[in-house]
């Protein structure tokens, strides 16, 4: 799979989660965003929310289930924009906003 196909999968994933999580941004990051993906690579997806008011532990299984509906390769992470982290900075710098 190439980067463009991964982006299309992330777009479908974003459409799946938008109605209930309302992310401020969704990024493809990792090997696909860097054009370094191999045959066995997963699709790293960062879901950014403005301020996480809900229980993170309750949301993560829902993000995974939504991913499975679209592609078993999706590996989501949830990022709280209100609490910046080194991962978030790397995703913003190197990822592809979808």
Image (cartoon, grey):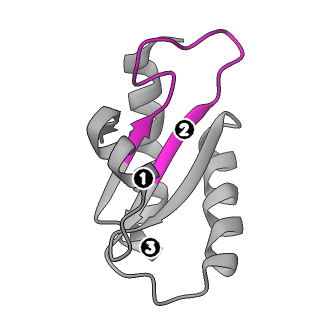
Q: Marks 3 and 2, Cα distance to the nearest angstrom?
A: 18 Å
Crowd tier of the residue under label 2, counting other residues whose Cα lies within 10 Å: few below 14, some 14–19, many 20 or above: many
Residue at image mark 2: 44
Q: Residue 70 placed where, x, y %?
A: 59, 42
Residue under the point 50% across and 44% down:
45
Q: Regarding mark 1 in the picture, which secondary structure is present there?
A: helix
Residue at image mark 1: 86
Crowd tier of the residue under label 3, counting other residues whose Cα lies within 10 Å: few below 14, some 14–19, many 20 or above: some
Q: Which of marks 3 and 2 is nearer the N terminus?
A: 3
Q: 54 above or below 39?
A: below
Q: 14 above or below 39?
A: below
Q: 53 above or below 20?
A: below
Q: Marks 3 and 1, Cα distance to the nearest angstrom?
A: 23 Å
Q: Marks 1 and 2, Cα distance to the nearest angstrom?
A: 16 Å
Per the picture, the main secondary structure of the magenta-coloured stretch is: loop
Magenta part of the chain: 27-46
Crowd tier of the residue under label 1, counting other residues whose Cα lies within 10 Å: few below 14, some 14–19, many 20 or above: few
Q: Regarding mark 3 in the picture, which secondary structure is present there?
A: helix
Q: Nearer the viewer, mark 3 or mark 2?
A: 2
Q: Residue 36 placed where, x, y %?
A: 50, 11
């Amino acid at each position: 799979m190439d980067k463009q196909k991964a982006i299309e999968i992330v777009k479908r994933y974003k459409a799946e989660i938008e109605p209930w999580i309302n992310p401020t941004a969704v990024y493809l990051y990792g090997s696909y965003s860097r054009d370094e993906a191999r045959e066995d690579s997963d699709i790293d997806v960062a879901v950014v929310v403005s301020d996480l008011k809900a229980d993170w532990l309750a949301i993560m299984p829902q993000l995974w289930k939504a991913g499975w509906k679209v592609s078993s390769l999706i590996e989501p992470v949830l990022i709280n924009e209100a609490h910046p982290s080194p991962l978030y900075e790397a995703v913003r710098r190197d990822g592809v906003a979808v």
